[in-house]
Image (tube, rainbow, N blue to C red):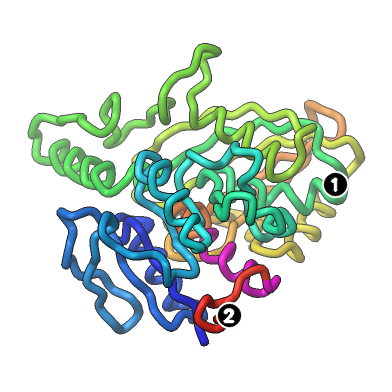
Amino acid sequence: MGFTVAVVGATGNVGREMLDILAERRFPADEVVALASPRSQHTAVSFGDRTLKCKVLDTYDFSGTDICLMSAGGTVSKEWSPRIAAKGAVVIDNSSVWRMDPDVPLVVPEVNAHALDGFRKKNIVANPNCSTAQLVVALKPLHDRATIRRVVVSTYQSVSGAGKEAMDELFAQTRAVFVSDPVQSQQFPKRIAFNVIPEIDVFMEDGYTKEEWKMVVETKKILDPKIKLSATCVRVPVFIGHSEAVSIEFEHPISADEARDILREAPGCLVIDKREKGGYITPHEAAGEDATYISRIRDDPTVDNGLVLWCVADNLRKGAALNAIQIAEAMVNRKLIAPKRQAA
């Protein structure tokens, strides 16, 4: 007997990826239900070689649901996740609402799958921020070997992280530039076409943005609260794929060659690091892929025990949809959940 899985926000970028990945990975589901807002009722979405018609979240009965993949934004999740969890479904939420709740595990399976053991406190598991997810996949094996003291990261984040409307705006602005039409900005504070914007989410009192704050606190919760981290998050005119330039200071010596060997064996990592023209990965090549790609691993001569690396991943997959489904898979494999119908 397989699981009953509901995908909330099934018409969005991440919701559609969730459906694709459930089918690709042959998740053990007997039934998959696509849920959305009333305006998207009956909208068709793909699930493998099948088409699902969206049902309305507000009127759906979750009593028979085992797993709910939530990707409908923080406002919806804050209201609905506890209600769905109360019906006995495990909620795996992609928003930021539950990430720092001490009773909610914040999980990247390659890094801290053991944290799932505490999910029953609220029946909710949080998916981390897209930029955090790929970062901790790269940091974890190095931290295990040499203990990370400090990280400085600059991100180059694609517009898909801001949703479909943001992708449409990049396309429209790019076209407008080429045909000499007026360039209009609605989704971003400044023009994104042929530009970069060092502002993601709202500014906080200390001058950092909330996106940068998320990377700090989420890395601490997932990996190690002792790690010091500073981030600068930048939106770039790329449709899919987040990139990060990462400087790491360790407590113990570790060479670039040793780090390269460790990362080659690490779960979720794929090292492409040839010291030649084009011997690295860009977001274009990472789009549609599951791995966290790591390139340009080198010593940092400005600090003791320092390394610098380049890290790229598909933000819609590892940064969101794939990680959520990997969480569900880990819960199944660890026998933390079973289908309600089987249990009955």
- Mark 1: few/some/many CA within 10 Å (<14, 14-19, 20+): some
Q: Residue at x 24, y 44 (%)?
A: 165
- Label for residue 343? 2
Q: Looking at the image, is mark 2 or mark 1 earlier in the sequence? A: 1
Q: Residue at x 59, y 70 (%)?
A: 329
Q: How many marks?
A: 2
Q: Residue at x 59, y 75 (%)?
A: 338
Please state if 29 lies on the left or on the right of 167 as rendered.
Answer: right
Does residue 327 show up magenta in the picture? yes
Q: Residue at x 69, y 45 (%)?
A: 222
In this rendering, which labeled residue sits more in front, label 2 or label 1? 2
The one nearer the camera, 58 or 255, is 58
Please state if 327 lies on the left or on the right of 306 as rendered.
Answer: left
**Highlighted magenta segment, given as a residue range:** 323-335
Please state if 105 lies on the left or on the right of 89 as rendered.
Answer: right
Image x and y of residue 50, in percent: 28, 82
Q: Amino acid at mark 2?
A: Ala
- Label for residue 255? 1
Task: Give the distance between the C-alpha atoms of the residues marked 2 and 1, in whole angstroms.
Answer: 51 Å
Please state if 121 lies on the left or on the right of 54 as rendered.
Answer: right
Magenta region, main secondary structure: helix
Can residue 237 be seen?
Answer: yes
Q: Which image quarter: residue 200?
A: top left
* SS state under label 2: helix
Q: Amino acid at mark 1?
A: Ser
- Mark 2: few/some/many CA within 10 Å (<14, 14-19, 20+): few
Quadrant the C terminus occupies:
bottom right
Q: Which image quarter: residue 230?
A: top right
The one nearer the camera, 158 or 71, is 71
Image x and y of residue 61, in percent: 34, 65
